[in-house]
Image (cartoon, rainbow, N blue to C red):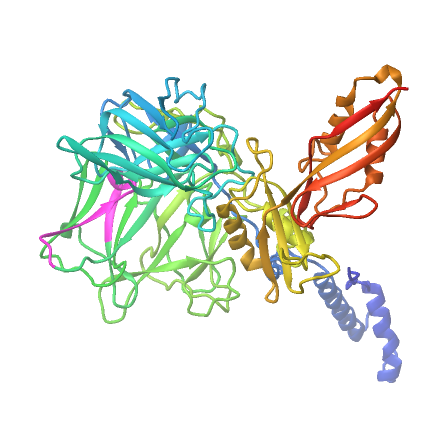
Amino acid sequence: MLPLPNLDDRTFEQLVREARDLIPGIFTEWTDENAHDPGITLLEMLAWHIEMQQFQLDQLTSDHERKFLKLLGESPRDRIPAATSVSFSNAERPILIPYGTLLHVEELPFETVRSVTVLPDTTKRVFVHTAENSREISDDFESGSAPFYPFGEQGKVGSSMEITLEQPLPEGMPLSLWIELAAQEPTIRIPARYKEFTPSGKVVWSYWQQEGERGSWRPVDLERDESYGFHQSGPILFQIPSSTGRVHRLKAQLVEGGYNDAPCVRRLIWNEVFAKQGQTLCLSECFDRPEGEHEEVEFPLAHSLFQKGEISVQFKHPSGGWVDIDEELYTVTQFEGKAKLVFQKDTELPSGKECIRAIAVSKEISGRTFCGRGTGISGQTCPILFQPMLPDQLQLQVGWIVEGENTTVWYDWQRVLDFDESHPDSFHYVIDAEEGVIRFSDGVNGAVPPSTPFANIRMIGFRLGTGEAGNVNKGTIRKIEVAEPLQVTNLFPAYGGSEPESMKQAMERTKLRILEPNCGVTAEDLERRVMEIPGLRIARVKAIPGYKTTIHNYPTERALGHTSIVIVPYSKQQPLPQPTEGMMQTVRRHLEPYRLLTTRLHIIPPEYVRVTVRAIIRVDPRYGGREMNVKQVLNEWLQPYGIDSSFEGWEFGRPIYKSDMYEVIARVPGVQYIQDLWLMADGKDVYREEGGDIHIPPNGLAISGEHEIEFITN
């Protein structure tokens, strides 16, 4: 690391003395260098000014640190709200819970992140159909006390799980079924809408549609499967199409692929939805103008704030801004948890994409959405009216009267971290969380809200939220703001809530990231990238540069530009697990952005080599008949998995030497010496030397065979 120079290396006295020493050589007539001389006074003033400049140059301010972080592609992180999963119950009929419904832990608010329909508490039955048999899960599958295998213990293609409900599923309403697996969670959960994961087993959901005396299975319109085909705990989100009829049966069938471990379901929970800590005080939704002529034009309003807040509507202006429209031109209707924005036929709607905007404001802040009035002066600030806030949810509009018109046009302004990449006319603002203000322009870049005789800076999106305080315990969310007498609880502790990063914390995090770069240059880099893949349960991984499976004399023969990555999946059911096609495809897709241009990556399975030991051993007579002790030691040593942290399993491609076998067996209590020993191996690309040592391929792992041990006691 380069040494940091000391820029503040001269004191005021040194600067004055240096200046005085230069006087005789520059101006010989200047002979009076006493303090009363005006020239000396000017020198002392300049020396003080230079000393102040040196001091400032030697300081590293927070602005400097922010710029250095930006060069590294980082910045201090905002406050992150906690999240959890909640479930509703005690409904007498299907009840729609809209997106954004408020929940409470005492005074701490949470909001649902999507709409969900709460089903009545009625009888539900579960059946498992396999090629061998069909059986009903008679235990309580909602409490989690009796886990079961939805596709049988083998997880074979064609197996299915069927759910039968006493009351029919409602049509055209969002439904949610939470699938909780039993001790089969991946190391890193698959985030929602993650497209790089390829499930090992493909699961198809369908519903039974009755048609007279007959019926058929129809595919379910899945909005999202956050369990990713029973690879992790998560909900399936779906709807039953309208005009389908009474639907009582739902089926999940494994149609192709398979699993290393057949999924085991701990419990099934209906009426589940994610909730995030925070409370929305205002928000907006934009809509496209529909094509064709309509008697009435309707737009669904998803958030619950549209049902209990104050509504306003804007139309797109030709200049790119927005214009508030008269309340007489539209109506907002509500029915059974749904809200709609309705325009009459004679209303002239603007054309284009996202040209209509609906804004909802909570009655708690009615009339307080205006942050201030523009001054037209660079560096203007406005106070953040409510705290604590979630900065990424803030939306601002600045309005002014456009030339040639007599109405106010409102323009959306965008949040940026700084004004470095802004232009003088960019509608940008910066949130200064430490000062609690919103900044416009830095004097060079960024537009300034124009001066107007009225308040012209307002919020159309704002959300309150805390950080770590939202990480509440399981079962603490009990209150819901709906008219129905529903019960609610969070299934798991809330997680992920964190306070905004300080500059020091951001610097420390960046230092750690630099020490472990997120790249794929070396073999160790590739191995780390594989272990970071969401959704996979990987026991071991090995990157082998210069190897591909067509080479039989590695490392003497090497394939330049090729790297093979061996994947050993974690499995409790399979003694010799092999990665599925879906797992290898997921690894391949994940590593592609990290692959060097001149390198080809090969994702390959391990090659298990079964090693059998035949030995004649002289033992102490007191240890006669204890052949199992030797076999146990060999079994623990010849295995692909480690027993504990001290031994992670057989090293990939490591030869099996007779000398190692002698050493391992000799450590067994009672063994005096080994009279003779033979090694035999069964596997692909295995060869045995004349001396008896066995060489295995680079992706090979030794496993224990059926050993034959003969003891001699005399």
Q: Residue at x 42, y 42 (%)?
A: 386
Query: Residue 227: x, y in percent?
Result: 42, 38
Horizontally, residue 618 falls left or right of residue 706, namely right
Query: Residue 91: x, y in percent?
Result: 27, 23
- Residue 311 belongs to magenta span: yes
Q: Quadrant of the C terminus?
A: top right
Q: In the picture, residue 693 is in which quadrant?
A: top right
519, 374: nearer the viewer: 519
Whether residue 99 can be seen here: no
Task: Point out the stretch of residues depicted in magenta.
Answer: 293-313
As drawn, the residue found furthest toward the top would be: 622
Query: Residue 397: x, y in percent?
Result: 35, 56
Horizontally, residue 432 falls left or right of residue 156, namely right
Residue 590's place in the image compared with 632, above or below, is below
Query: Residue 206: x, y in percent?
Result: 29, 37
Q: Residue at x 68, y 56 (%)?
A: 552
20, 11: nearer the viewer: 11
Q: In the picture, residue 45 is in which quadrant?
A: bottom right
Residue 615's place in the image compared with 587, above or below, is above
Horizontally, residue 550 falls left or right of residue 415, namely right
